[in-house]
Image (cartoon, helix red, strand yellow):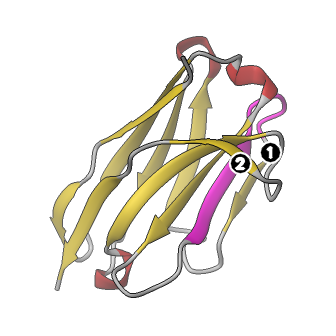
């Protein structure tokens, strides 16, 4: 069974940091790109960052460049999103997803983890 499980969300003050984890099982991690998305209330889901597990290429939305860092531990089938200098506008449910490439349709999705940044 394919599973993606996010963890690490929570409540943090503006300027603080959180690290999200995405643990994957049931598929070969190395063959996929893993992306982070977020959706705030009343807004459309947006892509935040993506990493291709095979070669480690990374992509970031302009809104998080310089503040967020994505990384993967292929041996543990885990992908991390380090979020620094958090802003209230980063508040959203964060999802990880696996697909055949960054920007390509994503086949598998996690259940999401809430990130709330207070001002």
Q: Nearer the viewer, residue 17 or 102?
A: 102
Counting from the top left corner in percent of width and height, residue 22 is at: 46, 36
Residue 24 magenta-highlighted? no
Residue 14's tag is none
The residue that mark 1 highlights is 57
Viewport quadrant of the C terminus: bottom left
Horizontal and vertical percent position of residue 17: 29, 59
**Quarter of image, res 41:** bottom left
Callout 1 secondary element: loop
- 49 to the left or right of 80: right
In the picture shown, does residue 85 fall above or below 6?
Answer: below
Secondary structure mostly taken by the magenta-highlighted segment of the chain = strand
Residue 83, above or below 15: above
Q: Position of residue 79 (x, y in %)?
A: 54, 34
Residue count near mark 2 (Cα–Cα under 10 Å), binned few <14, some 14–19, many ≥20: some
Instruction: Please name the residue shown 56% across and 80% down the image.
Output: 63
Residue beneath disc 2: 106
Q: CA distance from mark 2 to mark 1?
A: 17 Å
Residue in the image at 58% along x and 65% along y: 48
- In the rendered image, the residue lying farthest to the top is 75
Q: Secondary structure at mark 2?
A: strand
Snapshot quadrant of residue 36: bottom right
- Residue plotted at (36% across, 84% down): 89
Q: Earlier in the sequence, mark 2 or mark 1?
A: 1
Q: Which residues are magenta?
A: 46-56
- Nearest-to-viewer mark from 2 and 1: 2
Residue 8 vertical placement versus 64 (above, below): above
From what the image shows, is residue 34 above or below residue 45?
A: above
Q: Is residue 23 left or right of residue 116?
A: right
Residue 6: which quarter of the image?
top left
Dot 1: within a 10 Å radius of its alpha carbon, few (fewer than 14), some, or many (20 or more) residues? few
């Amino acid at each position: 069974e394919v599973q993606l499980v996010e963890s690490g969300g929570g409540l943090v003050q503006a300027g603080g940091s959180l690290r999200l984890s995405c643990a994957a099982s049931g598929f070969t991690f190395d063959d996929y790109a893993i992306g982070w998305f977020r959706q705030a209330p009343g807004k459309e889901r947006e892509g935040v960052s993506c990493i291709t597990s095979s070669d480690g290429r990374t992509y970031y939305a302009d809104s998080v460049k310089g503040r967020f860092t994505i990384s993967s531990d292929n041996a543990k089938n885990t992908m991390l999103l380090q979020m620094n200098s958090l802003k209230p506008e980063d508040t959203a449910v964060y999802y990880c997803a696996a697909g055949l490439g960054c920007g390509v349709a994503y086949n598998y999705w996690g259940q999401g983890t809430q990130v709330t940044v207070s001002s």
